[in-house]
Image (cartoon, rainbow, N blue to C red):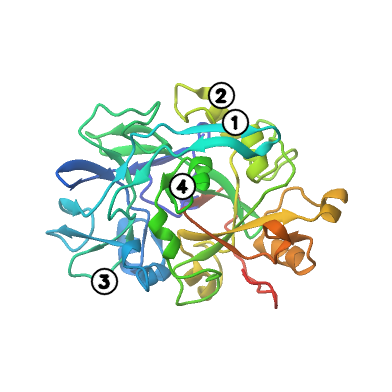
Amino acid sequence: MTLEKGKQTITSAERVDLTRDFATLPLHEGTAAGETVWFVITDVSDAALATELGVNHSPKLSNISRGCPACAQTVTSEDPVLGKAPVEFEGAPDFSPERTFVPGPTGFPPQSFSVGAIGRANYSPFVRVEGTGVVYNAPIVATGDGPFDVTTHSNTHDRTLAIDTEEMTTDHLFIRGFANGEPILYLSFESSDAFTAVGERSTFVPALTDSPFQNGGGETDSARASIFTFVNAKTGLEEDSPQGAAAGEGRNQGLTHAIVSGFPGVDAAVENPEVLEAFQRGADISNIFDVFPTNARASDRREYSPLWDLQIGVYSDAAVARGMNGLKTDANTVRRLADRRLVTSPGGQPLGSGNVLINCPALGFLESPPEGPRIAVPGVQP
């Protein structure tokens, strides 16, 4: 079963497979320090280019280098539009480390973990073509000239399920999440935090920590938007359905849920169908986007950024006792709970940025388009 084109926000995706939870994306070739690299394009700061390339428009990306030169790299190309001509990157990821994850006695926190990919010097997924001011989200998903390891991912991204350098496509495992009360699909490529990178099966890029700026959700001069997860939400998977998990009975979310339900120590690969089947039933972290590219208000659409400022929520003992730690699908609901101190940051602090950044572009929506609106709550930061 596939997602209809009209429900994709990345319209350049050739296929969004709802049975094995992957998107087939156009693949582009480049080089970095003499090595061949392979990348995708998911977002851009320019509206006209977003339409031309079939990717998300994110004006907030134009702020990415404010106070953080390392948060974007400058690439060289004979064409000012990324991907139209050969590209030379300043840096690339190292995919060779072995990703490991050993759950703790109750799942979270883990007993041990190690990242499966790390950005080398000068690597950022956010790039400008030299001589232009446009910022693209262009994560590198593989390095070298093949053969490509899409099982243990020694030269590919940990969510890469297939690469075809003749057809110039790559299959990338997506995540099922939520925005404005609606089930959505999104991609995951990088994180500034090692644990989050392992949990998200993404590339560790610590330089993104300094991107502008903490609690920048709702601020036009920030590169970040707000995204929400939970430490101690309920766990469990949705029953099987042709389109996969949405917001049905049994569905849950969060860090403990993903560790307990999502085979965190097993590589995501076609050869490991139990992992893909679990994700199709909602085993991933299933974060909540604050905004989405389909929002009705222009101000909310302009708020969208693939660079998400993670708000890590902890339900209070009272909330857990009352069974309030079930599935949440709307950031406005989370803000209202935070206002009542039923959800806090770890340690009992008011809910706010954990200064953990994740590069998670919107991919599409399963049912109705998320329309918003984003509703700020006085005294609640995100």
The disc, 3 or 4, on the residue closer to the chain's N-terminal end is 3
The disc, 2 or 4, on the residue closer to the chain's N-terminal end is 4
Residue identified by numbered label 1? 278
**Discs 2, 4 touching: Cβ within 8 Å:** no
The disc, 4 or 1, on the residue closer to the chain's N-terminal end is 4
Front-most of 334 and 68? Answer: 68
Front-most of 206 and 241? Answer: 206
Q: CA separation, marks 2 and 1?
A: 6 Å
Q: Secondary structure at mark 4?
A: loop
Q: CA separation, marks 2 and 3?
A: 44 Å
Q: Amino acid at mark 3?
A: Gly
Residue identified by numbered label 2? 274
Residue 137 placement (x, y as % from top left): 35, 57
Q: Does residue 128 appear to the left or right of 108 in the view shown?
A: left
Q: Does residue 294 appear to the left or right of 249 in the view shown?
A: left
Front-most of 19 and 121? Answer: 121
Q: Secondary structure at mark 1?
A: helix
Q: CA separation, marks 2 and 4?
A: 20 Å
Residue identified by numbered label 4? 188
Q: Secondary structure at mark 2?
A: helix
Q: CA separation, marks 4 and 1?
A: 17 Å
